[in-house]
Amino acid sequence: MLAVCAKQPGLDSTVEERFGRAEYFVLFDEEKNMPQSIENKAKFESGGAGGTAVRLLNENGVDVVLVPELGPKAMDAIKAFEITAYRYTEQKSVREIIEDYKNGKLSKIDTSTTASKHGMYKA
Amino acid sequence: MKIAILSGKGGTGKTTVATNLLSVSDSGVLIDTDVEEPNSHLFLKPQIQKTEAIKKRYPIVDESLCDLCGACGDFCRFNAILPAKKSVLVFKELCHDCGGCQMVCPNDAIRYKERSIGMVYSGHTITGHEMHYGELTVGEISGVPIIERLREITMDDDLVLIDCPPGTACSTVAAIDSADFAILVAEPTPFGVSDMKMVVELLRDLGIAMGVVVNKDGLGDKDIYQYCESEDIQILGRIPFKKEYARKYAGGNLISQVDDEYKSIIEGILKQVMSQKEVV
């Protein structure tokens, strides 16, 4: 199952600029070609939203996620849940980003792309 | 008597009032519980005689006992422990050290380890008083264990002045927990009054008697006086807004040591507060 960070539900939504506090995740089953949107409940957390968002993706059977950025804690969690992350850098629709992914235009990431939101914490 | 000096808004003059009250008291002790930004020591200039590292625990998971059931992750309100596919991740700086994950673990796989989250410094000030201040390490989520230690150290002292963190969050509640009386320092501005109302509510919830010191009197408007009158809150003193005071303060002075007029205002406040002792 593929997941994309999105501002609204649905394939025509614009992709999010954040991961842990993204509004929605649009889930896309490549075999069934069926999109399904889930609200990211982790966005309400006062701390540790990244790790909790990864847990939510895992519960929904996600094994590939397309992200704008990943903090150190979210990256640790992505690895521990054996999810693969690809990074997009453009503000497009979810549909277009999925196309970019399918065409091999997105690069895989395995280190965090942002500094921690928690001061001295080192990844 | 334990006297908390607090305010809703930052920068109203808590530390200025607290440090000057200490300097005119006979035998007071001051604790600076604003551990995210302590600065009473900048004015009191203590000779540090003792430093103590404050520890907090975080969980360690024994993977040979853990069956990844997920109970710890479901329990933790702070997302500090995250059971994943083959291991359990611990984000130790998110941990509040509540002990809950160990209690809910059915396999007894959780132990705790200690780590330092900040320091407590103790010494004697230039005025010869005893003081203790805490400092939370940057990036740590909560200074409450440091504040509790500061209160513990001064538990048996007769007169303790508690320089509190601003606002009404957990750290303020921890600082005023054992206070007998609260001095609410407020500015006569719309912001000052609005933020002060939150503290009044907090103090009433906790049943702590209070009085108000209006700092920078002459600024803003008269709303603070109307509010105090309508809520029946005693005004303990008014400190005028004067460039001269600002200059002395900015030079790192205890204003009451270099300004007689200021000193008599502070003495007046202390006297008013001490007369509450019989009431408390």
Image (cartoon, rainbow, N blue to C red):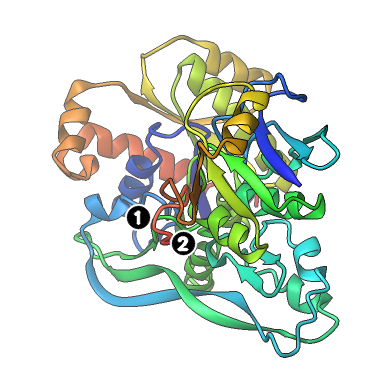
What type is the residue that disc 1 sits on?
A: Ser
Q: Which residue is mark 1?
A: B25
| Residue with the most extreme front position | A103
What type is the residue that disc 2 sits on?
A: Leu
Residue A122 falls left or right of residue A28: left
Question: Circle 1 sits in a helix, a strand or a loop, which is it?
Answer: loop
Residue A46 is situated, as x and y percent measured from the top left of the image, at 63, 45
| Total marks placed | 2
Dot 1 crowding, Cα within 10 Å, few <14, some 14–19, many 20+? some
Chain under callout 2: B
Q: Residue at x 26, y 34 (%)?
A: B262
Dot 2 crowding, Cα within 10 Å, few <14, some 14–19, many 20+? some
Q: Residue at x 38, y 69 (%)?
A: B119
Question: Circle 2 sits in a helix, a strand or a loop, which is it?
Answer: loop
Residue B5 falls left or right of residue A15: left
Q: Residue at x 44, y 24 (%)?
A: B187
Q: Which residue is mark 2?
A: B159
Work out how far the residue at label 1 is from the one at label 2, CA to CA, in angstroms.
9 Å
Q: Quadrant of the N terminus of chain B?
A: bottom right
Are the residues tagged 1 and 2 within 8 Å (C-beta)?
A: yes
Q: Nearer the viewer, residue B146 or B261?
A: B146
Residue A119 is situated, as x and y percent measured from the top left of the image, at 41, 52
Residue B44 is situated, as x and y percent measured from the top left of the image, at 24, 55
Can you see residue B71?
yes
Above or below, comparing residue A64 to residue A93 in the picture: below
